Amino acid sequence: MLEHVSKQGAAGESGRTLSPRAEAIIAEPAERSVSGVVISGIAQLLEAVMLALLGYAIYEYFVEIGQLTFYIPVILGSCLLANVLFNAGRTHRIPAYRTLFSQISRVLAGWTLVMVLLTIGIFFFKASDLFSRLWLLTWFVSGAVALVAYRLALRALIWHWTKQGRLLRRTVIVGGGKDAEELIEQIRSSATNDIKLLGLFDDRVDARSPDDVLGYPKLGKVADLIEFARRTPVDLVIVSMPLSAEKRVLDMLTQLWVLPVDIRLSAHMSKLKFTNKAYSYVGDLAVFDMADRPISDWNLVFKWLFDKLVAITALILLSPIMVATAIAIKLESKGPVFFRQSRHGFNNELIKIYKFRSMRTDMLDAGAAKLVTKDDPRVTKVGKFIRKTSIDELPQLFNVLKGELSIVGPRPHALQAKADNQLYYDAVEGYFARHRVKPGMTGWAQINGWRGETDTIDKIMQRVNHDLYYIEHWSLLLDLYIVVMTPVSLVSKNENAY
């Protein structure tokens, strides 16, 4: 994929100057948005658990006939059916949570239908002797009251988060003029509660692209958007260009694909009509999916849990090795046990990673301007061993617990690291695309032998290619495979580690 990426992908490193209007938006406090998919999933689970516990509690206090073994499957089945009906009624959507009468009426209708079907089922299977009518009626009434109370509380919480900006997708438009004006009007009418428009970016500087469109400012050119999105949260980019403008769309994508954002091409300008399956929707606005952030929604939750569980387990199991390493470093040379170094993290954010010190204190190279080579005089005897075995990286487990690193991901490189006397981001086009996900302690490149010294451009290109492959093919199983294979690769593929 590298051959399709322009050098402009490295604009964020160049310290590009943004317009005063863009700087003003960056200066405003901005909450990171939370996933509506995750919120609705948790809301569904809590609602089902609430109904199930209510049904069981009523059984315990009121039922004098029937065995619990008959009630449990009926309770669980009814809750599952209720969840299906609530979803069919589109009540588990962020916009639906904000409504009052529409949401509650649909929920009560679904719950009533569940009870009707349950009553018919009991009668049809002649199971009235096994189930208490008092239990059924009490569960129906108390369930309805609980659902109303739950949905009112959920509505209040969603509105609170909306006012905080946590449920608004911070959005920018690429394009300008009349086309962008039509797009903004559609967004206002269909997705006002989910979208927070920040402004527009357009390469045109003539009358076709005014400085303001319906009150939203033009913040700069498309290349400026890269720097803008790295300094303030941006969740969604909507492109207002016709499909016929193939070259302009391609030029835009080759600049923006390095960002961890969703990119959508608005269909409002297309004269071609496709089937509904060809579109996705922003509110009611039909769009074409051009690029997605690599890991989002529940996948982000699962990866977070994976990182924390593996990090805690590794710290417990490897603590004897870490303590022994710290003692060995102190015994061999003066200086601190740990070494902190600035690296690029997710979306080019600067982070400080921890390592065991492997160099002599008077020869430390904080910026890694000079790569470590074979028999490097700066490296201590203990340092040579822990670098070869990657024990020096173990303190980064604390970075994982802090949320700055993942267990698996593209390795974070030192800021001044070079290949063939060129900075990495100058040597490899699309280099910053590897920062679309959180960096990791180990990765796909490392278990395939691309670790250690990068004295040639080909070596760093191989690393980046492997990192991009990992991002495009990410799964929890792939992460688990990389974790399992990392110790194996340390033994069999460590010829480049010094």
Image (cartoon, rainbow, N blue to C red):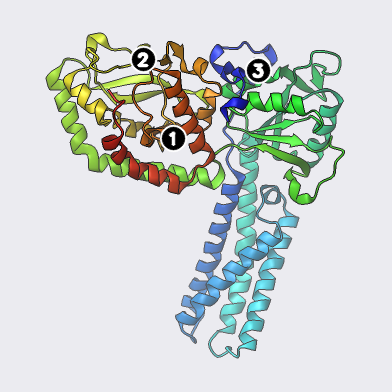
Q: Nearer the viewer, residue 480 or 466?
A: 466
Q: Is residue 113 left or right of residue 493?
A: right
Give the residue type that dot 3 points to. Answer: Asp
Q: List x then y, in percent, for residue 438.
A: 47, 33
Q: Which residue is mark 2?
A: 368
Q: Which image quarter holds the C terminus?
A: top left
Q: Secondary structure at mark 2?
A: loop
Give the mark nearest the N terminus, 3 or 1: 3
Which quadrant holds the N terminus?
top right
Residue 401 in the image: above or below residue 118: above
Q: Residue 3: x, y in percent? A: 59, 26
| Residue annotated with mark 3 | 224
Tell me the kind of residue under disc 2.
Ala
- Front one among 435 and 233: 435
Residue found 72% across the figure and 50% down from its top = 99
Question: Where residue 375 appears, x then y in whole percent?
Answer: 23, 16
Depth-wise, is mark 3 or mark 2 nearer the camera? 2
Assess disc 1: are there few (<14), some (14-19) or many (≥20) residues with their C-alpha within 10 Å of its C-alpha: many
Q: Crowding at label 2, few (<14), some or many (≥20) Cα neighbours within 10 Å?
A: some
Residue type at numbered disc 1: Gly
How many C-alpha atoms fall within 10 Å of the one at disc 3: few (<14), some, or many (≥20)?
A: many
Question: Which residue lies under the disc numbered 1?
Answer: 409
